[in-house]
Image: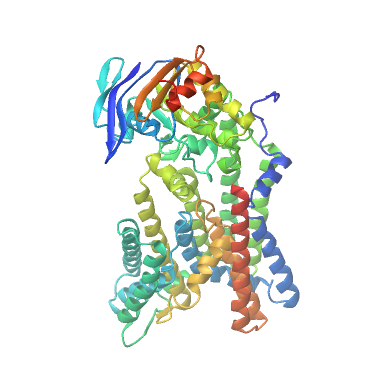
């Protein structure tokens, strides 16, 4: 289990986070929701090691850890898929998956090993891409998102953070990506899903954590919460 | 979700090929079409154009500018530009000539020193680009003028250094493969190509990966064999296959293998495709960029030496006039994208073949150089237009 406790972060005059806590358990999808400026991105960046918190702690299985850089996060098994995906559109799926950590022998790329591993991984995630050797530019938005998520799984992480994975997608592709999120849960991964779309959140998450103005503003079990109660927590309407 | 097979076993369907075409992945086909058109037009206008003698001359003329173009491709792949390649080629040729003729050094040592000079120049460009954050356009524009200045300074009063005709350097461009050697080389190339394809196919089958149908493999091997046999037959009917062409061809093949089969090559494409993604994947973007400029200038230096070998002299015009534009045009016409991340080293070979054919053909027709410039410009513009349009198609 990954526990974030009492994290605060200030940018100049803006208190982005104040005493925020969050628990992420294996095999659970937690949705992080909140209005613009609620502190979702800052919290994600703290967990992913992109920015350092002013105070607060992150613990993995009860042991306090230091996440000082994205590299630290990677080493601790925290993988993040950012909204812009960071794929090289001119390279194919295989090359994108292994970019920066290509297996080599005598400094030559091991094409066949990489392609085999790619196919196995995509098949296990039930991601359907007809030809994985074409440039990523030729794939649909949903397929690209799937490739980015598959890449996040290569390092055998324990936590996958997904930043707005369905933001730019159509109905069918959104459904595909949500299916993929469910499959991550079946694999026993902890998933932190940042989303604006409450329908998506309700469709896949087990728990909803609401942030408002940099503080915890409510936590719901998705199955028991109503849309109204979540919206109320986001807007601060019902005190 | 109704698709039965998640992954099809044959990626080489006609429909897939059409898809690739529509997405702007035209490959080498526009260039090959252009070459055929050039051969037909000039061949009918002048019976001498397709003669073995002229085609062998063409092969000889290609090597120097082609090598410079190969260097240009290294920076184009990153989406950058090297405007200094012409000047650097001239300067390094002058360094080589002065050391070997005026100072009496061993020509081989002189060549190595000239190449090292080229590498250092590239290192300087790369550092100015990555450390000082200067746009590559400005860095190499300064190089274009600055290295030309150094060339004039080094040549001094004389303004020309002649290379002895029987010296090592001049001999480079006057060495021809015997027919036996040429045919053996052809045989080895085709055999190695076929064998490596077969081995790869075997390994893919063993790993349960999709493979292209056998007939496609046959077509590829036969295609290579036909092209090589035709080229060797034509050139052997004249003086033989020039050593210069073999050197240039080797460089093209070696750099293609490096780009496709090493992490360095893959990272070059990655940086050219999406710098941010490359950086986040842990690639040392700065190192890749510096290396690309080093390669570009080193290859330019080598091209300059080949050019000096052809002329058996270096003078104030070495590396000047239209060499730079020809080299850039060749890379783009051959299919290297100006926007980075797309292209192969064979672009240098194909592109320079197109440009040199046009130049050569118009020379035979005694067309004025004014017209020649305009036609070359039009071809370059057309190539860039195809590149831009296909890029738009690729992202749309």
Residue B56 visible in rendering: no
User: Percent from the top left, x then y, of residue A94?
Assistant: 52, 35
Q: Residue at x 53, y 70 (%)?
A: B326
Residue furthest to the right: B44
Quarter of the figure with residue A217: top left
Q: What count of labels does the image hold?
A: 0
Depth order, front residue of A173/B119 = A173
Residue furthest to the bottom: B157
Depth order, front residue of B239/A106 = A106
Q: In this view, does B167 lie above or below B244?
A: below
Q: Is residue A132 above or below residue B228?
A: above
Residue B321 placement, left or right of A132: left
User: Percent from the top left, x then y, of residue A16?
Assistant: 32, 34
Q: Is residue B249 above or below residue A85?
A: below
Q: Residue at x 35, y 15 (%)?
A: A1
Residue A227 visible in rendering: yes
Residue B193 placement, left or right of B300: right
Residue furthest to the top: A224
The structure's colour scheme is rainbow
User: Percent from the top left, x then y, of residue A111?
Assistant: 51, 36
Quarter of the figure with residue B130: bottom left
> Which quadrant is home to the N terminus of chain B?
top right
Residue A8 placement, left or right of B227: left
Quarter of the figure with residue B117: bottom left
Q: Which residue is drawn at 51% across and 28% down?
A: A117
User: Percent from the top left, x then y, of residue A133?
Assistant: 58, 38
């Amino acid at each position: 289990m990954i526990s974030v406790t009492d994290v605060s972060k200030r940018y100049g005059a803006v208190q982005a986070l104040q005493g925020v806590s969050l628990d992420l358990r294996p095999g659970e999808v937690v949705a992080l929701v909140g209005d613009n400026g609620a502190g979702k991105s800052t919290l994600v960046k703290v967990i992913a090691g992109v920015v350092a918190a002013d105070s607060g702690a992150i613990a993995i299985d009860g042991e306090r850890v230091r996440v000082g850089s994205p590299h630290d996060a990677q080493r601790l098994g925290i993988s993040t898929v950012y909204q812009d995906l960071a794929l090289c559109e001119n390279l194919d799926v295989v090359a994108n998956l292994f970019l920066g950590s290509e297996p080599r022998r005598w400094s030559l790329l091991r094409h066949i090993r990489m392609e085999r591993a790619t196919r196995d991984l995509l098949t296990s995630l039930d991601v359907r891409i007809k030809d994985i050797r074409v440039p990523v530019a030729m794939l649909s938005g949903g397929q690209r998102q799937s490739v980015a998520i598959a890449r996040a799984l290569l390092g055998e992480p324990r936590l996958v953070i997904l930043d707005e994975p369905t933001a730019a997608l159509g109905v069918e592709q959104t459904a595909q990506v949500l299916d993929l999120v469910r499959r991550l849960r079946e694999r026993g991964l902890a998933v932190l899903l940042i989303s604006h779309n409450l329908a998506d959140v309700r469709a896949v998450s087990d728990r909803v954590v609401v942030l408002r103005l940099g503080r915890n503003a409510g936590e719901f079990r998705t199955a028991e919460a109503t849309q109204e109660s979540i919206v109320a927590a986001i807007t601060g309407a019902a005190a | 979700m109704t698709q039965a097979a998640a992954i099809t076993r044959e990626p080489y369907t006609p429909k897939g090929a059409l898809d690739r075409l529509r997405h702007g992945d035209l490959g080498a086909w526009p260039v090959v079409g252009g070459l055929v058109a050039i051969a037909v037009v000039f061949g009918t206008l002048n019976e001498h154009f397709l003669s073995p003698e002229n085609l062998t001359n063409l092969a000889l003329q290609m090597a120097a500018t082609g090598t410079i173009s190969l260097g240009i491709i290294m920076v184009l792949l990153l989406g950058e530009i090297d405007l200094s390649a012409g000047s650097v080629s001239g300067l390094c040729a002058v360094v080589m000539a002065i050391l070997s003729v005026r100072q009496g050094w061993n020509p081989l040592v002189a060549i190595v020193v000239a190449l090292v000079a080229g590498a250092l120049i590239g290192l300087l460009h790369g550092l100015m680009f990555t450390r000082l954050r200067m746009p590559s356009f400005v860095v190499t524009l300064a190089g274009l003028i600055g290295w030309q200045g150094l060339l004039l300074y080094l040549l001094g009063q004389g303004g020309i250094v002649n290379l002895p005709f029987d010296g090592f350097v001049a001999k480079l461009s006057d060495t021809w493969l015997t027919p036996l050697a040429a045919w053996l080389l052809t045989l080895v190339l085709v055999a190695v190509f076929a064998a490596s394809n077969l081995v790869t196919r075997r390994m893919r089958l063993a790993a349960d990966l999709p493979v292209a149908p056998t007939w496609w493999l046959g077509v590829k091997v036969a295609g290579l064999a036909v092209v090589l046999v035709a080229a060797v037959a034509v050139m052997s009917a004249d003086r033989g296959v020039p050593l210069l062409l073999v050197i240039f061809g080797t460089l093209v093949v070696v750099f293609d293998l490096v780009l496709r089969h090493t992490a360095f090559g893959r990272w070059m494409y990655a940086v050219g495709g999406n710098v941010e993604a490359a950086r986040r994947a842990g690639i040392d973007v700065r190192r890749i960029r510096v290396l690309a400029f080093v390669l570009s200038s080193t290859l330019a230096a080598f091209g300059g030496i080949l050019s000096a070998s052809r002329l058996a002299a270096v003078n104030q015009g070495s590396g000047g006039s239209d060499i730079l534009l020809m080299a850039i045009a060749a890379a783009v016409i051959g299919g290297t994208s100006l926007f980075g991340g797309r292209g192969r080293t064979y672009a240098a070979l194909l592109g320079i073949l197109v440009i040199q054919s046009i130049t050569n053909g118009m020379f035979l027709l005694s067309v004025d150089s004014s017209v020649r410039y305009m036609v070359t410009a039009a071809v370059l513009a057309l190539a860039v237009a195809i590149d831009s349009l296909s890029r738009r198609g690729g992202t749309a």
